[in-house]
Image (cartoon, rainbow, N blue to C red):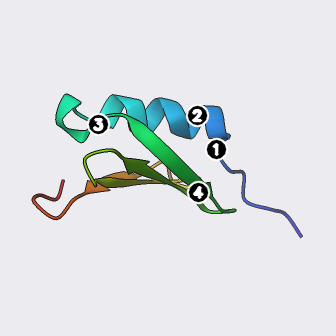
Amino acid sequence: MTSTPTLTIDQTDELILKACTPEDGAIEDAEVSETEVSYFFESGAVGTVSRVRGAVQITSAHRSR
């Protein structure tokens, strides 16, 4: 049985920092699971990074990217 390689937290941090905008504000908190990291910004935006695919999504009540 082989396990799927996952990104490190440092790698997901780099991806979310490249994807966020100044309007998102600073990252206030994060939650880590085996498959993704969720980032919570001061603006209320929430970003998720897949630790398997490296896909990044940032959403807020006002917009979705």
Kindly indicate the quadrant of the structure image that contains residue 52. bottom right
**Element type at mark 4:** strand
Residue corresponding to mark 2: 11
Earlier residue among tags 2 and 3: 2
Q: Amino acid at mark 2?
A: Gln
Q: Amino acid at mark 3?
A: Cys
| Position of residue 17 in the picture relative to residue 23 (left or right) | right
| Residue ID at (64%, 44%) | 7
Q: Residues within 10 Å of mark 4 (few under 14, many from 20)?
A: few
Residue corresponding to mark 4: 31
Q: Which mark is residue 7?
A: 1
Where is residue 61 shown, x and y percent of the image? Answer: 16, 65
**Separation of marks 2 and 1 at Cα, in angstroms:** 6 Å
**Separation of marks 3 and 4 at Cα, in angstroms:** 17 Å
**Element type at mark 1:** loop
Q: Are marks 3 and 4 in contact (CB under 8 Å)?
A: no
**Separation of marks 4 and 2 at Cα, in angstroms:** 15 Å
| Position of residue 29 in the picture relative to residue 33 (left or right) | left
Q: Nearer the viewer, mark 2 or mark 3?
A: 3
